[in-house]
Amino acid sequence: MPHAPRTRKAAQRAVAALVLAVPATILSPSSATAAPSTDAQWHLDAMKAEQMWQVSEGEGVTVAVIDSDIDRSLPELKGQVLPTRNFSQERDTTKAAKEHGTSMAALIAGTGAGSGIKGLAPKSKILPIVLHESDLSFAQLKRLPRAIDYAVSSGAKIINMSFGTAIWEDVPRQTQNAIHRAQKAGVLVFASSGNDGHQSNSKHYPAAIPGVIAVGATDRQAKPAKFSSNGPHLALAAPGAGVVSRCEKNTTTCPGNGTSAATALVSASAALIWAKYPEWTNNQVLRALIQTAGRPGATADDPPNTRIGYGTVRPRLVLEGKADPGDPDKHPTFSKYYAELAAKSPQPEASSQLDSPNSEPSAGSEAGADTGADTATGNSGDDSNSTPLLIGGGLAAAALLAGGGVYLHTRRRSHGTRL
């Protein structure tokens, strides 16, 4: 990692690297009005979505998407998106700036109308909360906690954060406290693990924060995607290779690779379950997801692995009544962490000293994973085209502490754009 540059502008460039796993392939312009192909939405078949929709479509569940803004004019998102709350210091309203947030919203709650993307939980609602790249710098650390608190106070049951940063050696206290408040309020918080699969045990935040459920990506054979970041904090996974997204200023769709899409599908899976079992707590919904997750060759007694945690989510099994929700008050992955925190202080959000993410060495040990996984035939996506969304890095952190900004880079096969 290079040393901190001598100028603030150079420092900002040096630390640019935030992972919003956006589409990696551009389709031809002629596909702009065509419905996404069945192959492009292979994850719906793999997860047996049509079968699940006979039981639940996520009705009554609100998913907060902390991301770029959302293009609510698209047919598949009309009526699906609640009023936007903008916590960003920027006001970029261009369609290009809305691609990532729009894709995540569509993968969760898209209706498929107008040849658009069909989401996994098509009757859930999206609460859009806007943050831009500069809002994730050290100079703007309070913006993410405020966004999380807003999602909780607005009634969201699930928070989807398809982004991450690799620069925090110690979790900023404001963010950790906001995660504690969300957990206490009964909210599930999911975050993408990142797209640095070539690195060993690469931790991204907020995914590695205690209380956040880190999500990895799998390919069409339900195997860990090569680009998906790994580490002992991973809890769950979902399809992320070659998953359809919005691109070209939201005028068309194209398959992409990334843990962003995987995180959206895990959030949608939780919405399906909560709509079916509204009396369950966040701990119970998560426990059911873990119990029914699939890892080929794994047994129920195997601990989570560093690539896909307990395995690929299979909400279909939960909807079929094949999960035991268990203790409503016990967290299935961070029970020890929260027990220790409660012993230190009855008000964790007021604690002056918070444990580091390394205090919980693995994603959890209470529940085991089912063997096997639903799969679909075909080749996995082109992992070389995965698009990491990283914020900064290493020795340049001092520049951020001094007020430097952070870039959000978006790479595509044919060209690059900056949000």
Image: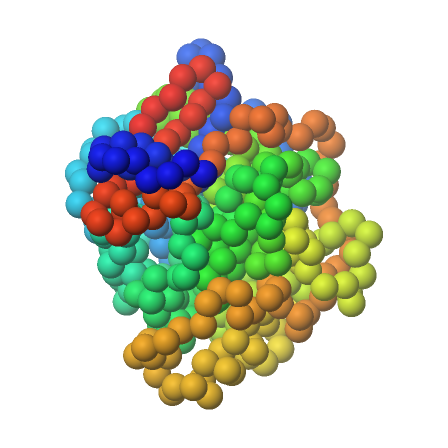
Side (left or right) of 177 relative to 343: left
Q: Can residue 414 be seen at all in this image of the molecule?
A: yes
Side (left or right) of 284 relative to 312: left
Determine the residue positioned at 58% across, 26% down.
384
Residue 209 location (% of width, % of height): 46, 62
Looking at the image, is 120 positioned above or below residue 245? Answer: below
Determine the residue positioned at 64% across, 36% down.
226
Residue 341 location (% of width, % of height): 45, 81
Residue 151 location (% of width, % of height): 31, 60
Side (left or right) of 100 relative to 140: right
Looking at the image, is 320 positioned above or below residue 392? Answer: below
Residue 5 location (% of width, % of height): 30, 35
Looking at the image, is 52 positioned above or below residue 274? Answer: above
What colouring does the structure picture have?
rainbow
Name the foreground residue: 394 vs 147: 394
Determine the residue positioned at 40% across, 61% down.
171
Q: How many numbered discs, if any?
A: 0
Determine the residue positioned at 55% across, 77% down.
335
Q: Can residue 147 be seen at all in this image of the molecule?
A: no
Side (left or right) of 415 relative to 234: left
Name the foreground residue: 113 vs 347: 347
Image quarter of the C terminus: top left
Q: Quadrant of residue 74?
A: top left
Image quarter of the N terminus: top left
